[in-house]
Image (cartoon, grey):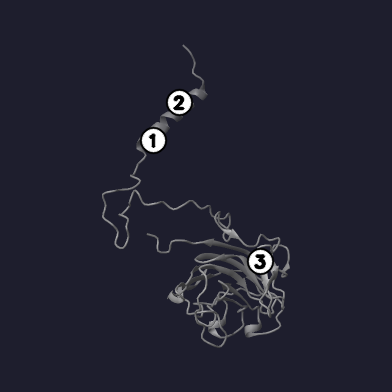
Amino acid sequence: MAVIPAAALLAGAGLVVAQQAAKKRRTSPVGYSDTPVLPGQKWKVHDIDRPRPKMVTPGARPGDPPSDAIVLFDGKDLSKWYVEDKKSRELKPATWKVGDGYFEATPGAGTLVSREKFGDAQFHVEWSAPTEITGDSQWRGNSGFLIMNRYEIQVLDCWDNPTYADGQAASIYGQWPPLANACRKPGEWQSYDIVFEAPKFEGGKLMQPGYATVFHNGVLMHNRKEITGRMAHRVVGTYAPHETEEPLALQDHDVAVRYRNIWVRRVMGYDRP
């Protein structure tokens, strides 16, 4: 009688197990065409014809850019930025100091402005306030994350540093205080994750205000909060018509705040049909 090798017996057994598992595997339809239409949409419940979301590969670690992100700083140079002269407003080659994986505001150099423009978007930015404390209130680690170069999420060292509520870290500057103070100590890296809906204009008239959802170090600060106008100091900011996409800016407030790991995802379809 022929002897069947043990490897062959194992292979055969594995095939049987796989076939049995396939028979037991539960299947489900990939969609339906006989369900009711969803209120306010053109699609049916579980519509088989509804477009499926595209694949996006998340970053390897929390905070890393996903596969569809536009990386505005790669840790090496500022080739994706200009600097805006404080007096002339002229855009010039970026002169902020670049260090090992970060860059730093150069006091007096001017605001940093991205070459690329954005509208509705998801933003990620990491920043660090100076460890040397030379002031208080608004002179402690002050900069600003200026969406569309006009709507400011405040950057400020608020670790044991009282200031006015609508001007502290993660505030929508001059409009809305954050829901909490989640600041880390000076010198430690902090993160903002922001979902921004750009305002809409028609014929020079505001049709829809902007909205911002903001997380500071993973803590919710604003939940789709309405933006009431442009950033302004000691006055009420108002809207003025602008393009559907505008650059991002990092404010020069004469303080050496550091930045790293800045990326953006264009977000289309808030009113997805």
Q: Earlier in the sequence, mark 3 or mark 2?
A: 2
Q: Is residue 192 visible?
A: no
| Residue 191, position as x, y percentages in the image | 58, 68
Mark 1 residue crowding within 10 angstroms, few (<14) / some (14–19) / many (20+): few
Q: Mark 3 or mark 2, which is nearer to you?
A: 3
- Where's residue 32, x and y in %? 30, 48
Q: Earlier in the sequence, mark 1 or mark 3?
A: 1
Q: Which quadrant would the C terminus be assigned to in this image?
A: bottom left
Residue beneath disc 2? 12
Cβ atoms under marks 3 and 2 closer than 8 Å:
no
Mark 3 nearby-residue class (10 Å; few <14, some 14–19, many ≥20) = many
Q: Position of residue 268 (x, y in %)?
A: 46, 61
Discs 1, 2 touching: Cβ within 8 Å:
no
Question: Which tag is nearer the camera, tag 1 or tag 3?
Answer: 3
- Dot 1 amino acid type: Ala
Number of the label disc, if any, that sits on residue 22 = 1
Residue 231: image location, x then y, percent: 55, 80
What kind of residue is marked 2? Gly
User: Few, some or many C-alpha atoms within 10 Å of disc 2 (few <14, some 14-19, many ≥20)?
Assistant: few
